[in-house]
């Protein structure tokens, strides 16, 4: 038996109820022909209207005798299909989203994650959204002591930041309902995700677990073995030193590039003190003041004519990194007798670090560098939870691998007292998705060209350095050897 409460008022709906739980997308359900259960007392469905306010809390319980188990909790998001004809029942269709939606809809953040380990960074974000009911869950990643040196969350949602952290740590994250007021945030390396019992390809296993159907799809729609990552601004990997001669009256000096972090400033060979503008505003006194992201720095005092200023700093430059899966390129080259590169491009301006830009590219190759096998399992038993890892002892060797439970759909046929569970399992652990269909706050920005717009095209130069990182190769384009061409789009089809 199913019991549904909206603002603590019991309601009823169609006898068929479907709840879809997903790894990253917001779990949801649709209540069709919904109305208060109290209407059943007098059967008067036409003189009253049921219209719950948006963001009303909805709780769905599975009732077994005196025991009630909360199986879904969320809020009313959209309302529709109310029949206004006086002689017709005034039922309503409701879209209910779980409170994970607040990770994207809630307040945007405005602080800097500075010199924090990964668990500390996650905790800092959760502390900022704790009023929405989010708490720290399980953090099981391979390198928890790795640090995020400087990452601005300005105007980003918590969802954006969690996805960024997952990218740079090559981990997966998900949410877990604790109770009606609490949701835990979990981060896992794929090798440390919770393990479910393996799927056996035997008649006894299928019967005992009431598996109705099991099938698979094989897709290369999102496959790539070369990932190009760009960013408009990243910190250079090496310092740059410039010499500037004072003119005797100006206190402002210009560098050739935007200043990221200053490491030293000398005047006539003598070390000088320096600080950022924000540090200066907090009371720090220094000989020179600079603002990260600007090309100029300022002297507190006027320097005499001919004074030699030597500044060493990490510049902010355009970033471009390439991550390759060489074995996959060779495999496709051998199979097709053609060049084996399958390439994808992405611009990520949510990072200022070349190293982190590389790690994001590695995450794409790691999770999308193989064709995705999707298993679909339908059962009358509740077998798995979203985010678990399960091995399939399949009749085909290619299918006998580990899978991640990506989504779970619960179909409850209340009148017939039947429940079916449909699971979607992914072989490459790919869980990337927008949290809501209306979510436009993702880190990635895709745009269409209009008439007269231009694009910049980078031509890869063969004289590159090859660097190994884990199991993947990274190709770094040498500074100054990238050719840039502008192409204008004369017409739009």
Image (cartoon, rainbow, N blue to C red):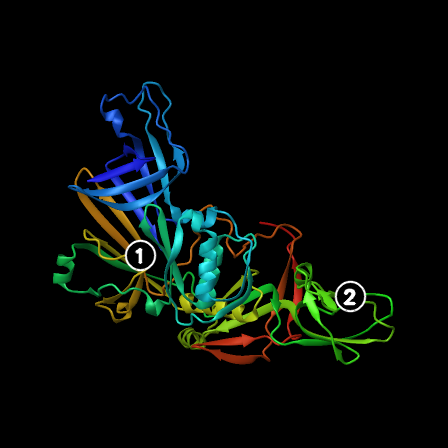
Image disc number at residue 386: 1
Residue 101 on image: x %, y %: 42, 47
Viewer can see residue 224: no
Total numbered labels: 2
Give the Cα separation between the discs numbered 2 and 1.
58 Å
Question: Crowding near pointer 2: few (<14 within 10 Å), some, many (20+)?
Answer: few
Q: Which of marks 2 and 1 is nearer the N terminus?
A: 2
Give the SS element for disc 1. loop
The quadrant in which residue 274 appears is bottom right
Q: Which residue is drawn at 52% across and 56% down?
A: 443
- The correct choice, above or below, for 206 with respect to 27 in the image is below
Quadrant that contains the N terminus:
top left
Mark 1, Cα crowd under 10 Å, few <14 / some 14-19 / many 20+, is many
Say whether residue 20 is left or right of residue 269.
left
Q: Is residue 418 above or below residue 126?
A: above
Q: Would residue 296 appear left or right of 407 to someone viewing this image?
A: right
The numbered mark at residue 342 is none
Which is more toward the observer, 144 or 340? 144
Q: In the visual, does 332 lie left or right of 211?
A: right
Q: Where is residue 41 in the image (x, y as percent from the top left)?
A: 22, 23
Left or right: residue 247 versus residue 68 is right
Residue at 69% of width from left, 62% of height from top? 280
Q: In this view, does 300 lie above or below 110?
A: below
Residue nearest the observer in this picture, 328 or 140: 140
User: What is the quadrant of residue 61 in the picture?
Assistant: top left
Label 2 residue SS: loop
Residue located 63% across and 67% down the image = 318
Residue with the mark numbered 2: 300
Q: Position of residue 248 (x, y in %)?
A: 87, 70
In this rendering, which labeled residue sits more in front, label 2 or label 1?
2
């Amino acid at each position: 038996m199913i019991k549904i409460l909206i603002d603590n008022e019991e309601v009823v709906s169609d006898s068929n109820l479907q709840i879809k739980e997903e790894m990253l997308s917001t779990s949801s359900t649709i209540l069709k022909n919904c109305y208060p259960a109290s209407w059943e007392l007098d059967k008067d469905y036409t003189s009253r209207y049921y219209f719950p306010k948006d963001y009303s809390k909805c709780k769905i319980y599975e009732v077994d005798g005196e025991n009630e188990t909360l199986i879904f909790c969320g809020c009313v998001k959209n309302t529709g299909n109310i029949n206004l004809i006086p002689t017709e029942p005034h039922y309503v269709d409701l879209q209910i989203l779980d409170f994970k939606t607040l990770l994207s809809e809630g307040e945007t953040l405005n602080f800097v994650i500075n010199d924090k380990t990964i668990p500390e960074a996650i905790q800092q974000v959760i502390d900022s959204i704790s009023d929405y009911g989010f708490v720290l869950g399980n953090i099981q990643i391979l390198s928890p002591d790795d640090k995020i040196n400087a990452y601005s969350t300005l105007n980003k949602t918590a969802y954006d930041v969690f996805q960024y952290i997952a990218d740079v740590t090559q981990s997966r994250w998900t949410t877990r309902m604790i109770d009606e007021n609490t949701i835990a945030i979990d981060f896992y390396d794929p090798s440390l995700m919770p393990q479910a019992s393996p799927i056996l390809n035997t008649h006894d296993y299928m019967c005992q677990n009431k598996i109705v159907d099991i099938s698979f799809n094989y897709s290369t729609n999102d496959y790539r073995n070369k990932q190009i990552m760009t960013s408009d601004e990243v910190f250079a990997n090496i310092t740059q030193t410039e010499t500037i001669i004072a003119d005797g009256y100006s206190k402002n000096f210009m560098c050739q590039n935007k200043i990221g972090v200053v490491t030293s400033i000398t005047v006539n060979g003598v070390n000088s003190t320096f600080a950022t503008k924000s540090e200066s505003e907090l009371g720090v006194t220094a000989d020179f003041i600079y603002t990260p992201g600007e090309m100029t720095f300022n002297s507190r005092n006027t320097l005499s004519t001919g004074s030699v200023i030597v500044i060493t700093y990490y510049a902010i430059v355009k970033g471009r990194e390439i991550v390759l899966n060489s074995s996959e390129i060779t495999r496709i080259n051998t199979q097709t007798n053609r060049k084996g590169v399958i390439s994808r491009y992405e611009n990520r301006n949510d990072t200022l670090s070349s190293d982190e830009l590389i790690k994001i590219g590695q995450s794409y190759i790691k999770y999308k560098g193989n064709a995705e096998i999707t298993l679909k399992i339908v059962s009358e038993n509740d077998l798995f939870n979203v985010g678990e890892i399960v091995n399939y002892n399949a009749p085909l060797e290619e299918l006998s691998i580990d899978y991640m439970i990506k989504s779970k759909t619960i179909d409850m046929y209340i009148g017939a007292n039947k429940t079916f569970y449909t699971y979607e399992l992914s072989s490459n652990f790919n869980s990337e998705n927008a949290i809501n269909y209306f979510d436009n706050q993702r880190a990635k920005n895709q745009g269409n060209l209009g008439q007269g717009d231009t694009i910049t095209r980078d031509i890869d130069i063969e004289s590159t350095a090859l660097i190994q990182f884990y199991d993947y190769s990274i190709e770094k384009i040498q500074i100054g050897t990238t050719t840039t061409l502008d192409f204008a789009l004369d017409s739009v089809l």
